[in-house]
Amino acid sequence: MLPALLLLLAFSASFDDSFRSGLIALERGDLESARANLETASKSAPRDGRVWVALSQTYWRLHRNAEAEEAARKAAAFAPEDAIVLHSLAIYYSETNQTLKAAQAEAKYSAEVPENGGAREHAIGLYFAAARPLLDQQKFAEAIVILKEGVARLPKSPQLELALGVACYGLRRFDDAADAFLRTIEIAPETEQPYTFLGKILDQIPSRLPQVTERFAAYESAHPASASGYLLHAKALDAQSLAPEMSLVLLEKSIALNGGDASAHFEMGTVLDRLQRYADAAGEFEQAAKLAPSDPATHYRLARDYDRIGMPEAAQFEREKHAQLVKAQESIR
């Protein structure tokens, strides 16, 4: 809090002696002297937000919490556009573990001093810090309220947009999640997480698939050494039943870079199924099952392809395995 107090002091040259004396006492830790002087100043200037924000800090350090809160409320009410007061309030609310209020005050402060990029980044960090515990507790609806406010006050923040997308994803609001992830990509195209999340919900966002495919293709072109870029591009094409031969080429590149990714082999199997190359598809699903044996979808697809290529006993084994895994998953929920 001391840097903010010094700013208050610097701007108090024309103010009465009690205010200056109170700030100096607060800076050196003489809390009772600070309280007495600042209370005197508040009587002579009862609507000065700078006095009240200094009093909020004084009362808090004296463990007079109710009075500290009331002083902070008055500071915000009397000086809603005073940059120094807003920044001081952000510090006070941070120190008293009121993270959302701190974020709101710092966002207002950053709007008053747009040349201060650090203030904007600090406000973004505070909004994320306010939402993160809710995300961790899967209280996604509450997190969305905070993150939407943060995005509105601090637009074009990839961190807040990504977090908003995750919260919507958690509520299975897939179109809203996709929009947030696409905005994240527009702002920060090098950030990998939004592409990964979009890759998980392709079946749920049919109207967004053309735009998503463009983004995946651009990411793949920009990252030729990334296995995930080729895989995601192939998945987007396959989700639209487009260009299976191109998808195979992309998947071959992905597997060449990372042969241990079960999802790439699974995707290769699905494309080969579309091409009615069932024996080859079964081989890819077998590899996927080796890499991720607890994925029920892989065993389901294997059972279908074993039936198609005349392996009924193997198909029955895979059906039973699929049923076991599904039952185990349902018992955990």
Image (cartoon, rainbow, N blue to C red):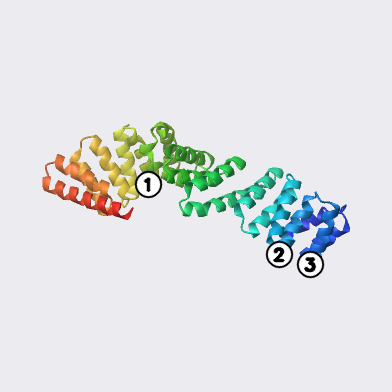
Q: Earlier in the sequence, mark 1 or mark 2?
A: 2
On residue 61, the disc is 2
Residue type at mark 1 is Ala
User: Residue 214: image x %, image y %?
Assistant: 43, 34
Residue 260 visible? The answer is yes
Q: How many numbered dots are placed on residues in this image? A: 3
Residue lying at 81% horizontally and 51% vertically, measured from the top left:
46
On residue 167, the disc is none
User: Residue 33: image x %, image y %?
Assistant: 81, 66
Residue type at mark 2 is Arg
Q: Earlier in the sequence, mark 3 or mark 1?
A: 3
On residue 227, the disc is 1
- Marks 3/1: CA distance? 64 Å
Residue lying at 52% horizontally and 53% vertically, measured from the top left:
132
Residue lying at 25% horizontally and 42% vertically, measured from the top left:
269
**Disc 2 secondary structure class:** helix
The crowding category of the residue bearing disc 1, from other C-alpha atoms within 10 Å (few below 14, some 14 to 19, many at least 20), is: many
Residue 275 horizontal side relative to residue 72, left or right: left
- In contact (CB < 8 Å): disc 1 and disc 2: no
Compare residues 48 and 218 and report the one nearer the observer.
48
Compare residues 42 and 279 and report the one nearer the observer.
42
Whether residue 247 is situated above or below residue 26 in the rendered picture: above
Residue 82 visible? The answer is no
Residue 130 horizontal side relative to residue 203, left or right: right
Residue type at mark 3 is Glu
Residue 265 horizontal side relative to residue 171, left or right: left
**Disc 1 secondary structure class:** helix
Disc 3 marks which residue? 32
Whether residue 270 is situated above or below residue 54 in the rendered picture: above
